[in-house]
Amino acid sequence: MRFRFRHLGFALLGSLGCAAAAERPSQHSTSDGKAAGTVAADSGRQTASPSAVRALYVNRWASQSRKRMAKLIAIADSTEINALVIDMKDEFGLNYATKNPDFAKNAGTASKISNVAALLDTLKAHKILPIARIVVFKDSVTARVHPDWTIRRTDNSIWRDKKGIAWVNPYHKELWDYNIGVAEELVKLGFGEVQFDYIRFPEPYPSLPKQVFPSSNDLSKPAALAAYLKDAKTRLNKLGVRSTADIFGLVTTVNGALEVGQDWEKISPVVDVVLPMVYPSHYPHGELGVKNPNAEPYKIIHTAISRARERDKKLGVSEPEHIRPWLQAFTLGKPPYGADELREQKKAVYDAGYDGWVMWNPGSIYDVFMPALEKTLESRKK
């Protein structure tokens, strides 16, 4: 069953949790000596933006359920978790009622959070940073509404991936304006950070037709992605929030660009935070010199993040928490993942020199990992 919030539900959730929220410190100390508590500008609803973020992913359906959100907020109230990454635009369209009629055309038909303002007020009361996750270039809803914005085949028909899904064209400037405009609208509603996902091109499998990108003007894939992210950062920074991007974990250790266009040297300088998805289960056997990557989460993540740190140093990128990896909070293959595996992943991040991370569980269910969460947020990075 999919639940929908009502304003009263959020208000009750906020009032019931006031005592717990009051227990949470308004600022967390970090090892770089700075207090993490800069409030994003331009909106009375925005909550503080901590320099060190430890977050949980919240999918569309969990965000609409009062029961599920109450549980996630309770986790944040009682542990080191200080942020929630919430699906606000995913492959099903928008997860909120936009006031922009042009955006509304791409909203999709899936259910939405009924009162975003009430949700954000509740998170603010609990001193939880709300981060808006926005899926950008894998957008079948926008592709249906705007077929002229899609990737094409050589015969000018719409290109589709192995699942028959149409992707929008990363070179299309109106598409850029739409996604950044959605981000700006969400910031004005009260989100304290924006996280762009699917910042990439679809895989060019040899078994599929060739991809054609109208309006590319010979601009490379990595350059196109970097240009989009630079534009987004410029516009979102003016509103006082960070602009961040998810990338494949392999990008941190592969020299040059992946076929999907992601290149560390191009992306890292044009975002406030880069979030590599360093899930051990996603690395091939033998990668990074590890026979079974899924069985050695510490080695995989420490190597990947240490390499990313080295590359940032060469680029002159020196922000203390510029890298915030996604951690594996799900099981894919053997061994099954639980609290011990999460502890190893967290330690790898700290030993590589960073304090922040985000846990990914596709169902937004974190019960088995709770024993690995500390009661308060303390700096652990080396």
Image (cartoon, helix red, strand yellow):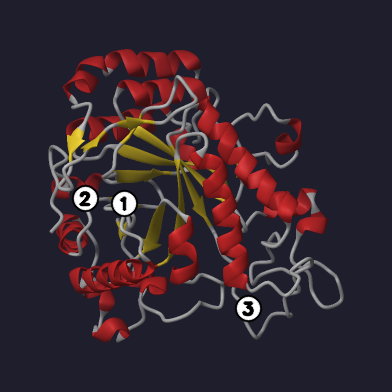
Q: Name the element at disc 3.
A: loop
State which tag comes first along the sequence, 2 or 3: 3
Q: Which residue is mark 1?
A: 359
Vertical comparison of 123 with 202: above or below: above
Q: Amino acid at mark 1?
A: Met
Q: Amino acid at mark 2?
A: Phe
- Looking at the image, residue 22 sits to the left or right of residue 63; the answer is left
Q: Which residue is mark 3?
A: 204
Residue at the spot x=20%, y=19% of the render?
22
Q: Name the element at disc 1.
A: strand
Evaluate if marks 1 and 3 touch, with contact meaning CB atoms under 8 Å apart: no
Please name which of the two marks, 2 or 3, marks the residue nearer to the observer.
3
Q: Which residue is mark 2?
A: 369
State the image coordinates of residue 344 (x, y, percent, origin top left).
16, 62
Image quarter (top left, top right, bottom left or bottom right) of the C terminus? bottom left
State which tag comes first along the sequence, 1 or 2: 1
Evaluate if marks 1 and 2 touch, with contact meaning CB atoms under 8 Å apart: yes
- Give the camera-side residue of 29 and 234: 234
